[in-house]
Amino acid sequence: MFLIINLAVKTGEIDLLQTSRKLIEQIIEQDMAAVERYNLKAKAHHVLQTNMGPSPFEGNIHSSPVVLLLANPSFDKNSSVDDHHFKVDGWPLAGMHPSAPSGMRDWWRPRLRKLCEIHGERTIASNVAALQINPWASTEYDERLNLPSRKGQIALAEAAVNRGAVLIIIRAEKLWRSSEVIDKYSKTFRTNSYQNSYITEGNMPAEAWRELNEQISRASRGQVSSPTRVSNRAADEQQELPKVAGDVEFLSLRMRLNGGIPALSKVQLGNGSLQFDVKGDIDEVTWARKQIEAGECIVRIQGALFRVKSTLGFLFPEWLSISAKLEPLTTK
């Protein structure tokens, strides 16, 4: 089971590279057995390149105002094991850097060239990210393959929705839209052509092209998009939630063996979602994570009870940052 976490990079605490490494380790643990079984019977062009390792995202998935939704990393004669390990300070989407390995550089730079002409290469590298529904590279994508990591990849896209990013579906539209959060989101678009992965005005709906350029311009000026009210069945069925943290009363995560109590901070409430940090020693934070994973974290908001529901997460030794959905509890 996963926890959705707020993946915003916190200066002096967690950097993007560390978060990426932990996610990769998690995906390897989840997927490897299934990948090995699949490869035993897969056709040559579908074989997953385990030597490349998983690449769940490119760019700063934590804060980029534009997120491209793809199928899986490509693999061809220009690919190398260095492709997804290449990093350059100030270039989160490192494949855009002129010194990037050719397999990455020759894929990313042509596809984002038009945006670079408008905003500049470094601005695009800092404000465009990409997610793969299947993080393992192959020559051709097999849409029938469903790995355990898929839920986590979709949850990362849903987290981008929660912070108001523009989503552009380039590949695997049906799978990405299996999430109602993504499907019903007003800023989810797709390219005009399934065969063309270039981000250009001609390959985008007019509204999408306008929206993504406005988002990038605002981000380059230091303006952050507001969280968006997502229209979906679950959200519509529950009450409008208050905006202030003081209205949230945690009815669990308050006691544990030996009297240690994990500290809760940075509580933020949105419509249908709750964000908060858990801090303490490693035992306390581990205990809190298990409580949330088991669905035993209950909160009271304006007299109504909700269960904290999470689907993706990372545990750091003394800190856990949660961005979860709220499930109304019916009392009889």
Image (cartoon, helix red, strand yellow):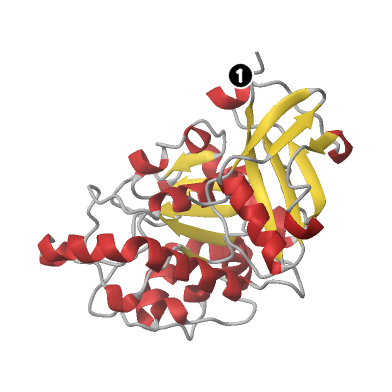
167 vs 117: above or below: above
Q: Is residue 271 left or right of residue 133?
A: right
Query: Image quadrant of residue 278?
Result: bottom right
**Between residues 105 and 262, which one lies in front from this camera angle?**
262
Q: Position of residue 133 (x, y in %)?
A: 38, 53
Residue shown at 63% from the left, 48% from the top: 291
Would you say residue 8 is visible in this rendering? no
| Image side of residue 85 versus residue 265, left or right | left
Residue drawn at x 69%, y 68% is 282
Label 1: which secondary element: helix
In this rendering, position of residue 249 left or right of residue 167: right
Q: Single out the residue that lies furthest toward the right.
A: 246
State the image coordinates of residue 64 (x, y, percent, origin top left): 62, 58
Q: Nearer the viewer, residue 300 or 245?
A: 300
Residue 181 position, x and y percent, is 52, 35
Looking at the image, residue 100 lies above or below residue 43: below
Examine the rendered structure and indicate whether residue 180 appears above or below residue 291. Answer: above
Dot 1 corresponds to which residue? 237
Q: Nearer the viewer, residue 331 or 3?
A: 331
Question: Looking at the rendering, which quadrant does residue 81 occupy?
Answer: bottom left
Q: Is residue 185 visible?
A: yes
Give, as a three-letter code, the residue at label 1: Glu
Q: Residue furthest bottom?
A: 99
Residue lying at 80% horizontally and 52% vertically, measured from the top left:
264
Indicate the position of residue 76 as horizontal and vertical percent values.
24, 74
